[in-house]
Image (cartoon, grey):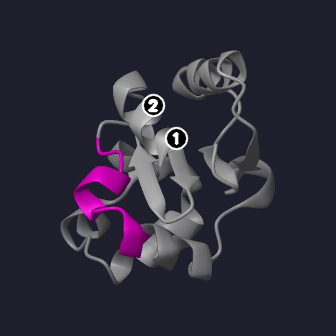
Amino acid sequence: MPDKTVILYGIPNCDTMKKTRKWLDANSVDYVFHDYKKLGIDKTLAKRFIAEVPLETLINKRGTTWRKLPSAQQESLDTTTAVDIICNNPSIVRRPLIQNGSQWLAAYDETQLRTLLAK
């Protein structure tokens, strides 16, 4: 594996995150876990997410966090307003979000995971 730090962003109690961590461990992938619940997401990190992952992919619109947002915030979502929404509601970010160097993957997909980690 290339000398890169794999970073797994998410929350520990999410079933998809548990599945992802199990897969990474089973495939001997060293990674750093960034726990949104403990570490949060600051504006710099939120802007980085938005720059690297299309907003339609980054924001989980199927989750309860999205559904609890006021409709005015949902309707005004763009790359500018998303920064504050993400910082104030870290659970709105699709999980898992994985960074391997300059490559990113949002959501669990074993085929895409293998491709991401092969780079």
32 left or right, relative to 10: right
Instruction: Indicate the secondary structure of the residue bearing disc 2.
Output: helix
**Residue appearing at x 50%, y 75% in the figure:** 48
64 left or right, relative to 72: right
Identity of the residue furthest to the front in this view: 2
Visible in this render: residue 40?
yes
Residue 12 part of the magenta-drawn span: no
7 left or right, relative to 85: right
Are the two marked residues, 2 and 1, in contact with CB atoms closer than 8 angstroms? yes
Instruction: Indicate the secondary structure of the residue bearing disc 1.
Output: helix
Q: Nearer the viewer, residue 29 or 98?
A: 29
- Residue at label 2? 114
**Residue appearing at x 29%, y 51% in the figure:** 57
- Residue at label 1? 117
Figure check: 76 above or below 34? below
- Start-end of magenta stretch: 50-61
Q: Amino acid at mark 2?
A: Arg
How far apart in space, not on screen, are marks 2 and 1 (Cα)? 5 Å
Figure check: 45 above or below 7? below
Q: Amino acid at mark 1?
A: Leu
Task: Give the x, y percent position of residue 87.
Answer: 57, 69
